[in-house]
Amino acid sequence: MKCKAILMVPLLAAAPAWAQTVVSTSVSNNTVISLPDGNTAGVTEQFTLSGLSGSVANVQLQLNLSGGFNGDLYAYLVNPQGQMAVLLNRSGVNAGNAFGYADAGMAITLDGAASANIHDYQSGSYSLVGGQLTGTWAADGRNVDPLSAGSVFDSAAVSAGLNLFTGVNAADLNGTWTLFIADLAAGGGTTVVDWTMLTVTTIPEPQPWLLVGSGLAVLALFRRRKV
């Protein structure tokens, strides 16, 4: 029994070494931007990520929006491969509410692993601090024309959130990203935007020597038990 326990040690030790290791790569921007009120042209920001490898485990984006009218806001994020995640799409707009939520701002984290969707945040538990929505939320994900009727939002698939990037080859995310934010309806006032940080969490590919070591441990154990 002692020999079997010793032979199992490399196998048990090797697996966590690659399976549980994650790497977070972030890019920050504290530049304050004022969105034109009721202007579909919005504001576009571009930034670069590099050095990503392995598989993407999660993507997060921190946003700080003050003033304005949350139901007016439309925002999306495009990765270097052209995949678009819809971050905000006129929160609160539905068949019974053509204008969306009237709260003035958000100090939030949009998270690819979150379950509570930002679009209908008032339907559950939420918190406002200084008038801004706070907390961690799933991106809207409704890839529909933001000027659509409310009923369109009710039936739209929630398929273009930040979880769109989960599981992809992280190397494909190296390069130029694009963030777009717009205030689509006039009259809500000016929204001041400060997007703080985009974070991509990856799981590195297992190193060949770990896989070989684990395989040898299994083989040795098999042969020992056979004898």
Image: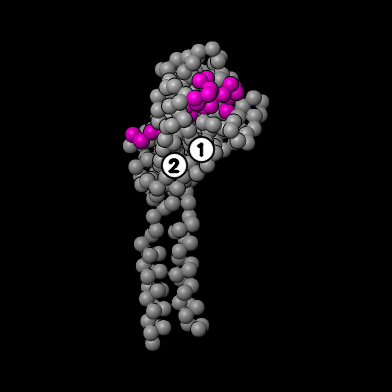
Q: Looking at the image, which is closer to me, 185 or 93?
A: 93
Q: Position of residue 66 (x, y in %)?
A: 58, 23
Q: Residue placed farthest to the left in the image?
A: 81
> Does 11 appear above or below 105?
below
What mark, if any, has residue 163 been given in the picture? 2
Residue 194 seen by the camera = no
Q: Residues within 10 Å of mark 2 (few under 14, many from 20)?
A: many
Q: Position of residue 90 (x, y in %)?
A: 49, 25
Q: Amino acid at mark 2?
A: Asn
- The part of the image, by quadrant, that contains residue 137 is top right
Q: Residue placed farthest to the top in the image?
A: 187
Sequence-earlier tag: 2 or 1 = 1
Q: Looking at the image, which is closer to me, 80 or 99?
A: 99
Magenta stretch secondary structure, dominant: loop
Q: Residues within 10 Å of mark 1 (few under 14, many from 20)?
A: many
Residue 164 drawn in magenta: no
Residue 67 seen by the camera = yes
> Does 161 appear above or below 88?
below
- The part of the image, by quadrant, that contains residue 83 is top left
Q: Residue at x 39, y 55 (%)?
A: 205
- The answer to whether mark 2 and mark 1 are in CB contact below 8 A is yes
Q: Position of residue 179 (x, y in %)?
A: 43, 29
Q: Which residues are magenta?
A: 82-107
Q: CA distance from mark 2 to mark 1?
A: 9 Å
Please name the residue that numbered disc 1 is placed on.
138
